[in-house]
Image (cartoon, coloured by chain):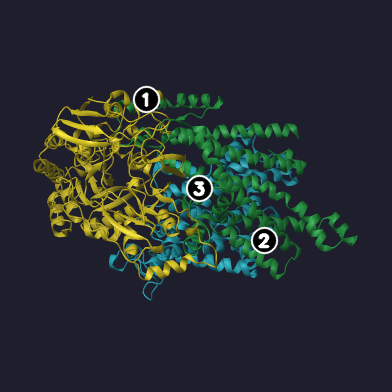
Amino acid sequence: MTDATIEKPRSELGIILTGVARNPLGLMGLIIVGAIVFSAIFAAWIVPYDPIAMNIQDRMQGPSASHWLGTDQLGRDTLSRVIMGGQVALKVALPAVFGAMVIGLTLGMIAGYGPKWLDNMLMLLFDTIRSFPTVMFALAVVALVGPSLQTVVFVVMATSIPTYGRVARTQTLTLRNSEFILAERSMGASMARILGVHMLPNIIGVLAVLAAMDIPTVIALEAGLSFLGLGVKPPTPSWGALLKDGYALIRQTPWLVVGGGLPIIIATLGFTFLGESLRDVVDPKLRKNR
Amino acid sequence: MKIEWMKAPTGRRSFLKGATALGAAAAMPMGWAGHAFAQDAGTLRVRAYGDAPNMDPAHSVGVVEEEIHASIYNKLIQYKPGSEWGWQLDAAAMIEQVDPTHVKFALRDDIGFTNGHGAMTAEDVKFSFERIVADATESPNKPDMGPLSHVEVTGEREGTIVLNEPFAPLWSIALPYITGNIVSKAAVEAAGGRIGSDPVAESGPYLRASWSPKEKTVLQRNPDWKGDAPAWDTIEIYPIDDENTAEIAFEAGELDLTRVSLGSVARYRDGVPNGGTLVENPSLFYVWLGMNLDHPKLQNKKLRQAIQHAIDVPTILEASYFGAAEPSTGIIAPGLAGNRAQGMVAPQANIEKAMALLAESGETNVTLSLDILNKTTYTTMAQVIQAMLAQIGITLEINVLESGAFWASGDNEDLQLVLNRFSMAPDPSYATAWFTTEQAGIWNWERFRNEEFDQLHAAASAETDTAKRAEMYQRAQDLMEESGAYRFITHEATPVVHSSRVVPALRPDGLSLLRYFGKA
Amino acid sequence: MLSFALRRFALAALILLVAVTLMFLMIRAVPGDPVQIMLGPRATPELQARLTAELALDQPIWRQLVIFYGNMLQGDLGTDVFSGRSVTQIVFQQLPFTLELIFASIIWSAALGILLGAYAAAHPNTVIDRTVAVLSVSFVAAPAFVVALLSLLLFAVHLQWFPAIGVGDGFWDRLDHLVLPAFAIGLSWVGYIARLVRASMLEVLGENHIRTARAFGLAERRIVMVYALRIAILPVVTVIGVGMGFLLSAAVFAEIVFARPGLGKLVIDSITTRNYPIVMGSVLISTGLFVVSTALADLINAWLDPRARTST
């Protein structure tokens, strides 16, 4: 579950979860995300059919008792591909968001705590990355190294680092002049100790919430790249690839677009609801900033 | 001369039963005057799959620009619309082949260029044709004019085309296609020898009224045109590269004619929305699976043959084209000289034979990569091939490339297998040209090198005996297939849908001849 | 304030420089030869050689970069060697299509978003407020290209209420053609802006002068609509600046799905054909747009809130 990203003791986690579950939207988000994570982990056991097994005679069928979401142009079961696609979506989203968070956190803390010139350089880097329209950047990178799961993870990660970096920097700047940090410093604590032991716990909560809210963006981005034909390699099922095929065949069968589009929307809703209520519980102050 | 289709295409015109009701229901929403009816009665709206920035025939890069050039310029002869290849007179009042290297012509006396550049004369013909072959022009279309020596002007409107050697494609390509367009000598010279995105001087039944890049090109009736008046006042050409988008636009009533994807043929056979019609034409394009003969992993001929036999073409066609295309036997389509009635490897897979060949090859644990373009047709095809090769124990990894990287595969030495599709003009020499030794590593991605093939390609275009010429091209394709580097898949097809307002004029391969379009 | 503005624009120029250089290096590292792709298989070696020289592709990368910047400083983005037209002209021909799409999206999403947000803030913790909250989260969650696909199918193909493709001629026709694409890429902004306005409204409504106004017995409606809203929509202005970049990315999808000309389409087409001068020209303009609009947003922010001037 996503709470794995929050490094907090069990009891605190319990409090947070209870807080989230008390909010009806939070509960809904928790259920949706739980279902997605569960089906992604156990995808191989719960898919009704082999998601890459072809059966051309039975292609492009509408929903039926044997194929709940119909079949695609190669007669593959859409529901099975949607379930496996969830796994791909998480395989992209989790490492990308985690990586972006770790790198963004590190760079952001260095920017906030380090010398001014380093701060300026890092901010310049963040702003530069942000200034590329994502699709343009993705096109260039994909053309450069070829499309694959790793490429998508890289593109998504690279484009979201600045968000985390900026937040981490702002938090660090606020904290660096706080009394307890000044006290630590006067006692001769090393920079690493100050950043790692004292600042990190105060920043990570905020970033973790940000990460939970960022996952849907990342899922949509992966789908968008696959839609442009820049995503994961076939025959790996991904929601975006389903949409791409579905768009090409949209008037033959609308079910591929439905099969690819609905999970994206539902997953996005689930993660957003969860993220929002998580934020309300962890840090109510953040509310006005988003 | 006429190039005949051996298998006459059945121009299927589907009638609409259920679809009429459906179309009518869709067109009448809530009293809103549907956009389908917001059209001008004199305006024809067609789709091209690309933009046409260049108005110079010498630098034309293909059919998209040619569709416009053919409307605003004149040629001595034009293709005839219909299901059989043939030509008709255009600017020429008379044209005849006096011997294998001399063609006499006389121009009509009522064709003039716009912008005050005067009547069309034999000097303009001489200038236009010789310009194509002149080195200074750097025309990529030079090979189309083949062994043109010069044009002799014998009168104000009379002349003789002189060839260095006999040239069979003169009547099928050189005169009625891109290089046949006649431009105004005075206007082009005044423009410094090169036409850019402005046509400088036009003479055809239409004039290019405007061009909005990537949005549309507008053609308007030429008031000074003295030939048969075209049926439409205005033609709007919309560049839409994606067939699916074009189909949506057609169904929304915003286009009168578009090529559609093969995947949609089955659906349109059951009925075309808004009372439209589906026309199924064969196509000359050729699609094949190539294997790079220079790649260390593909040195074993038995392995390549095992791959040839493991691939079931009918299944591929069913999956990616929904059965709307036929298997091919090579690179030369039915209807052109040199088409093979049968290939050496049957379209159907022979798994046992493939297994036996693989066993004989001694290769085990074979893992190969297949490069494809990022279109649904190819990803579908590649996944079917992947499943087929898995049956004989070959693991295939699919590399999906965007078009820029894909078309740069010529110098990619790591290329292993590739799904490729080339476009084609109605002459067999157009196809063999890309598989010569000279082209290895440029457009011959298989790096197929065969001396006999090269000789056949060179000799066949000078051969005027059609039967002999056909034999040479057939032999050339045998050589390709024998190398084990090719698995021929299909020539596709050109399905076109048009609205009930239009009587389209199409070449046998389904491309539009806009100046001959009629009104229903 | 002036020195802040100067510093901010110097930073903007620097960002642009780094971004364009990075893109230049990246796109050159990508395999693919523009001459081969654009001229097709039949180009003569002489023509290929000449165009390669014209594009300066035979020069070392750093020299190409110097040439590019040299020309750029003279206001010349180069010539598209394949059509002979100037890149500036090509890019500026496509720009209005994208700008009108972005502005249309901003206008309708801001209008509806502010309305929803203000209404929700005026009725906190009621059913309306919750409905708006759920709606806005759902809107934010809808990926632009999925909305584009579905609305195209429903409104253009099945119902035929709006045109499916192109940009149209004349004011009303153009507007008609804008409806669906602007709907698709603006939808998530409705949710975003609604939430932003609701939050800042609530804050403003709790502030002193509003309480004073209430104490003076001014009508609640007047307080909400005139005093609070005026202050509460200010953050929206700054957010729109940042939104430019996101909308540019979203516009790419809208332009593909609705077959519209525009900057996004131009970028994709030129990257896939490796038409370097056009890639660089359009990257320059689109990152320029983004950088300038974020700088403006920062300036407005600083003007409204002096504390912001010290950071950055």
Closest to the camera, between mark 2 and mark 3, is 3
- Judged left or right of residue B69, residue A92 is right
- Judged left or right of residue A88, residue C73 is right
Q: CA distance from mark 2 to mark 3?
A: 34 Å
Q: Position of residue A277 (x, y in %)?
A: 64, 63
Chain letter for green, please.
Answer: C
Chain letter for yellow, please.
Answer: B
Chain under callout 1: B
Q: Residues within 10 Å of mark 1 (few under 14, many from 20)?
A: some
Question: Which mark is drawn over residue C252?
Answer: 3
Answer whether residue A137 is visible to the viewer in this image: no
Q: Position of residue B344 (x, y in %)?
A: 12, 51
Q: CA distance from mark 3 to mark 1?
A: 44 Å
Chain under callout 3: C
When asked about the image quadrant of residue B381, the answer is: bottom left
Question: Which mark is drawn over residue B467?
Answer: none
Work out whether residue C215 or residue C185 is closer to the camera in this orientation and state it: C185
Residue at screen point 63% across, 49% down:
A200
Q: Is residue C26 above or below residue B377?
A: above
Closest to the camera, between mark 2 and mark 1, is 1
Question: Which mark is drawn over residue A280?
Answer: 2
Q: Position of residue B60 (x, y in %)?
A: 34, 36
Secondary structure at badge 2 equals helix
Answer whether residue B325 is visible to the viewer in this image: yes
When asked about the image quadrant of residue B124, the answer is: top left
Closest to the camera, between mark 3 and mark 1, is 1
Chain under callout 2: A
Secondary structure at badge 1 equals helix
The residue at which mark 1 appears reads as B186
